[in-house]
Image: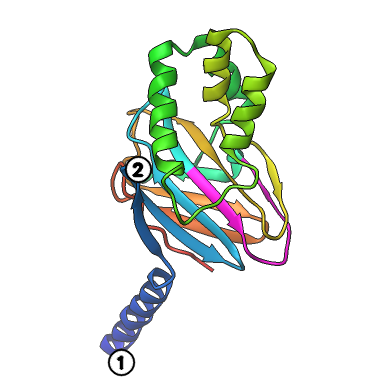
């Protein structure tokens, strides 16, 4: 009976694992490796950016609402839990923006913008209605100084709290302060409303998501 019970447990776990992974879409865009997962009409795409900015490790995020409900997306809802360690919340957008404007060098700005745009502009599976490009255009229109424009454009990359109605989408980068400056195993957990999306970080640039219901 003990062996049979263990076999049933293993079978059930394998069934759940396969069912979860059947919902995963994997693709590459602009040199980034994306994973996409849909639940209740909401699709979340994630890709780890290969570049680091100052003390930050960066995760690119795109969210599309194909459902009938309205969702609120916040950077703080993207939690990283290293193996055998406490969860680390992504930094609020205001903290990141202030840091980029005040302290980021020209080289930092160029690296961040290049890495981000190469992925998001080539992503044929995502069409933004209220994301980085809209924030960038607003930032460029507001400032006249070339240096401030560059910093503002980089700052526009940061994901901000966004209310997504049906048919709307947004994108942005979420920033973590990690030591070392990389995702080293563990999980990214995204909590939206009553739903939870879990992304196992099996390497520094290739998270494989599992949707835990």
Q: How many marks?
A: 2
* Nearest to the observer: residue 18 or residue 22: 22
Q: Quadrant of residue 8?
A: bottom left
Q: Check the image and report above or below for 58 versus 3.
A: above
How does the figure colour the protein chain or chains? Answer: rainbow
Name the residue that disc number 2 marks. 30
* Residue drawn at point x = 54 percent, y = 16 percent: 151
Contact check, label 2 and label 1, Cβ < 8 Å: no
Where residue 128 sits in the image (x, y, percent)? 58, 47
Left or right: 76 in relation to 111? right
For the C terminus, which image quadrant? bottom right
Where residue 28 sits in the image (x, y, percent)? 33, 51
* Nearest to the observer: residue 77 or residue 40: 40
Q: Is residue 56 visible?
A: yes
**Magenta residues (range):** 61-74
Name the residue that disc number 1 marks. 1
Where residue 162 sits in the image (x, y, percent)? 69, 43
Circle nearer the N terminus (2, 1): 1
Q: Check the image and report above or below for 19 versus 182.
A: below
Kindly give the residue lying farthest to the left in the view shown: 3
Question: Does dot 1 land on a helix, a strand or a loop?
Answer: loop
Residue 204 lies in the magenta stretch: no
* Nearest to the observer: residue 194 or residue 102: 102
* Residue drawn at point x = 50 percent, y = 10 percent: 103
Question: Does dot 2 land on a helix, a strand or a loop?
Answer: loop
* Nearest to the observer: residue 131 or residue 121: 121
Q: Quadrant of residue 70?
A: bottom right
Closer to viewer: mark 2 or mark 1: 2
Q: Which label number is shown at residue 34?
A: none
* Residue drawn at point x = 32 percent, y = 82 percent: 11
* Residue drawn at point x = 45 percent, y = 49 percent: 46
Q: Is residue 54 visible?
A: no
């Amino acid at each position: 009976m003990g062996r049979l019970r263990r076999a049933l447990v293993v079978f059930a776990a394998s069934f759940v694992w396969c069912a979860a992974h059947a919902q995963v879409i994997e693709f590459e865009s602009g040199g980034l490796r994306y994973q996409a997962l849909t639940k209740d009409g909401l699709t979340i795409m994630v890709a780890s950016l290969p570049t680091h900015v100052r003390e930050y490790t960066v995760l690119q995020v795109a969210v599309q609402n194909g459902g009938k409900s309205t969702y609120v997306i916040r950077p703080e809802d993207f939690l990283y839990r290293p193996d055998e360690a406490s969860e680390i919340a992504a930094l609020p957008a205001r903290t990141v923006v202030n840091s980029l404007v005040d302290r980021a060098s020209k080289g930092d700005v160029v690296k961040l913008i290049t890495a981000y745009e190469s992925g998001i502009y080539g992503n044929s599976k995502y069409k933004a209605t209220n994301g980085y490009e809209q924030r960038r255009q607003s930032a460029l229109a507001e400032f006249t100084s070339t240096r401030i424009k560059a910093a503002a454009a980089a700052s526009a990359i940061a994901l901000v709290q966004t209310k997504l109605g049906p048919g709307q989408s947004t994108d942005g980068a979420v920033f973590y302060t990690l030591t070392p400056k990389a995702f080293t195993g563990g999980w990214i957990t995204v909590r939206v409303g009553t739903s939870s999306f879990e992304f196992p970080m099996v390497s520094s640039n290739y998270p494989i998501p599992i949707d835990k219901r």
